[in-house]
Amino acid sequence: MALYQGQGGRDREQIQVPLFKSEWIVSGIKGDAITYAEQLGMKLVEERFTTSQIRNFYGELKRIQLKGIEEAKQKSAFHLLHPKLAYAAKRAEKTGGRGASTFKTEILKAHQSVKIDEDGSEKRFENFCDLCEAILAFHKANGGRD
């Protein structure tokens, strides 16, 4: 594990996020997905990613979910999450935020696993929403700031 300068000048180990598994989106959230969400939430705190940055994405995701992903318009909105994440990560880079890039990279792995235009996408979409909610919860539980 790499070291980074923690608060008070102490060296601390960097948090290592496990590899994402598309099976969590396809088959459902399992115990190792929770470990992934917890480690990613902690990593985002470490990289000073804010709760409001996650909530911007999560809020859009919930709007899509509430309107029903079955509608063609909502599937388009789901596709548009990709460029919105890219834009938000680039904007956050200007203020020195590394966490936005990490969040974008990890969320896009899950986003691609939903395969929204294929049969059975409703269940995969729900699993994606559950994973994103777990990441947000662990981020906040580990001291994610607004």
Image (cartoon, rainbow, N blue to C red):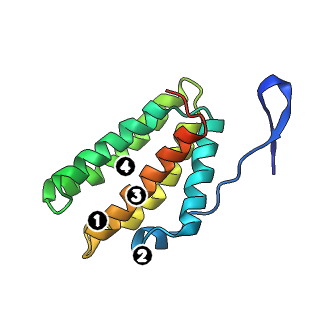
Q: Which residue type does callout 3 highlight?
A: Asp
The type of residue carrying mark 1 is Ile
Mark 4 vs mark 1: give the one in front.
Answer: 1
* Residue that appears at 26% across and 73% down: 118
What is the distance, in whole Å, between disc 4 and disc 2 at their CAs? 22 Å
Name above or below for residue 18 compared with residue 39: below
For the residue carrying disc 1, how many other residues have a C-alpha within 10 Å: few (<14), some (14-19), or many (20+)? many
Answer few, some or many: residues within 10 Å of disc 2's Cα (few below 14, many 20 plus, some between 14 and 19).
Answer: few
Residue 145 image point, x, y percent: 54, 28
Please report contact status of discs 4 and 2: CB closer than 8 Å, yes or no.
no
What residue occupies the far front of the structure in this picture?
141
Pointers 2 and 1 in contact (C-beta within 8 Å): no
Q: Is residue 45 left or right of residue 91?
A: right
Instruction: Identify the residue at the far right of this view.
Output: 10
Question: Circles 3 and 2: CB distance less than 8 Å?
Answer: no
Disc number lying in front (2 or 1): 2
**In which quarter of the view is residue 116 placed?**
bottom left
Gap in Å between the C-alphas at discs 3 and 1?
16 Å
Label 4: how many Cα within 10 Å (few below 14, some 14–19, many 20+): some
Q: Earlier in the sequence, mark 3 or mark 2?
A: 2
Query: What's under tag 2, amino acid-wise?
Result: Ser
| Position of residue 4 measured from the top left corner of the image (x, y, whole percent) | 79, 37
Nearer-the-camera pick, 142 or 79? 142
User: Which comes sooner in the sequence, label 4 or label 1?
Assistant: 4
Question: Sequence order check: which comes first, mark 3 or mark 1?
Answer: 1
Q: Which residue is mark 3?
A: 130
Give the left or right position of residue 69, taking residue 21 as reference.
left
Q: Residue at x 24, y 53 (%)?
A: 65
CA distance for labels 3 and 2: 12 Å
In the rendered image, which residue does mark 2 sit on? 27
